[in-house]
Image: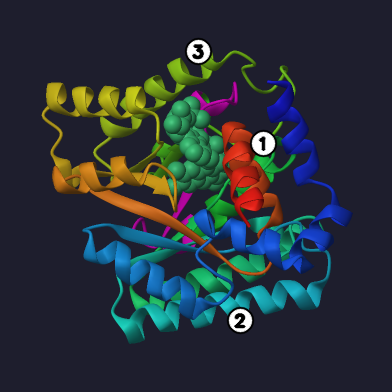
Amino acid sequence: MVARSALLYLSRQEGLKDFATRFSLFKKLTTRFVAGETIEEAVEAIRALNAHGATASFDHLNESVASVAETEGEVREYRQVLARIDETGIESNVSIKLTQFGLEIDPQLAYRNARAVVAEAARRGNFVRVDMEQSSVTQVTIDIFKRLRAEFGLDTVGIVLQSYLRRTYADAQDILKIPARVRICKGAYNEPPEVAFPDKQDVDDNYVRVMKLLLSSGVYHGIATHDERMIEATIEHAEREGIGQEAFEFQMLYGVRRDLQVKLAREGYGLRVYVPYGRHWYPYFMRRLAERPANVWFIMKNILKG
Ligand SMILES: Cc1cc2nc3c(=O)[nH]c(=O)nc-3n(C[C@H](O)[C@H](O)[C@H](O)COP(=O)(O)OP(=O)(O)OC[C@H]3O[C@@H](n4cnc5c(N)ncnc54)[C@H](O)[C@@H]3O)c2cc1C
């Protein structure tokens, strides 16, 4: 628990971020979780995933962007990603973060930028998933998502909810009324006990409750987890309720539990892999270490091996 908090604290340190971005040895070690720095490297990673029966979601790594010009650069990047998906014929949608589009500068700016990407996806028949970030932006993220969803179709834009938040079951009920496509995950940020369950068992119990609510809604949702108990609970619920394999998909992160990814795809389940790429990999990478502090030793061993 202490290791997790320490790693999440380090994930927010700007100085370390700059240092890590420049330090090439460290860069090499991130390749387990990050597909590369360029769109083309991510395209290659996605081709390999597609060959194993998995679809993907592009994530251009960047968050908490503080300049308007940089947020506009993010929109250009995503337009290019959507074009490359069409040109290459790979099976992928995209995931975006609203702080990447300027949420911390001005929510209206983030809305405009996100809208530009969603409009491009709509034009191309693709789908945009709005990732969920720290709890200080949960409400504004949902508000912006609802504006987007009011304008664009069910199969064009969806959102993420985190089972560690106390509010999430009510949010899921509310969002299903629209209706909308949800990715349920446990949540990856450091949150105070007033807003998030401190006890892992409560997070897991809430995950199962929300998963059941989503699956029984008849809308196509994403069940994002590497936790075999959550996966078993999902499969059991779907079988019990007569919900077919085609009615939902499992989602996992690039480089995490590849064995399980292959197994689920072989069993005929929809499996989407979240594929992050780009230069600003530091906070994402640190959150992956925080999820499993044993990963730190894996990384250290690689450094020592040279
Ligand atoms: C597709 C996808 C999208 C996501 N989007 C968001 C988002 O928008 N917002 C957000 O807050 N979070 C997001 N997450 C992260 C998520 O919230 C969790 O932090 C992460 O998935 C770990 O939770 P878990 O369900 O795998 O369960 P855990 O209980 O954390 O892990 C279960 C098991 O999975 C394996 N595992 C989990 N993480 C790792 C890792 N990093 N390295 C190696 N093994 C690991 C281990 O074997 C572990 O025992 C996303 C996750 C996925 C899969």
Q: Amino acid at mark 2?
A: Arg
Tell us which disc is closer to us: 3 or 2. 3
Q: Is residue 168 magenta?
A: yes
Residue 6: x and y, percent? 77, 32
Left or right of 251 on screen, residue 101:
right
Residue 202: x and y, percent? 52, 13
Q: Which residues are magenta?
A: 149-169
Q: Nearer the viewer, residue 72 or 261?
A: 261
Left or right of 33 on screen, residue 51:
left
Residue drawn at x 55%, y 52% as measured from the top left: 145
**Quadrant of the image containing the C terminus:** bottom right
**Local SS, label 1:** loop
**Residue under numbered circle 2:** 76
Mark 1 crowd level (few <14, some 14–19, many ≥20, 10 Å Cα): many
**Residue under numbered circle 1:** 189
Residue 161 visible to the viewer: no
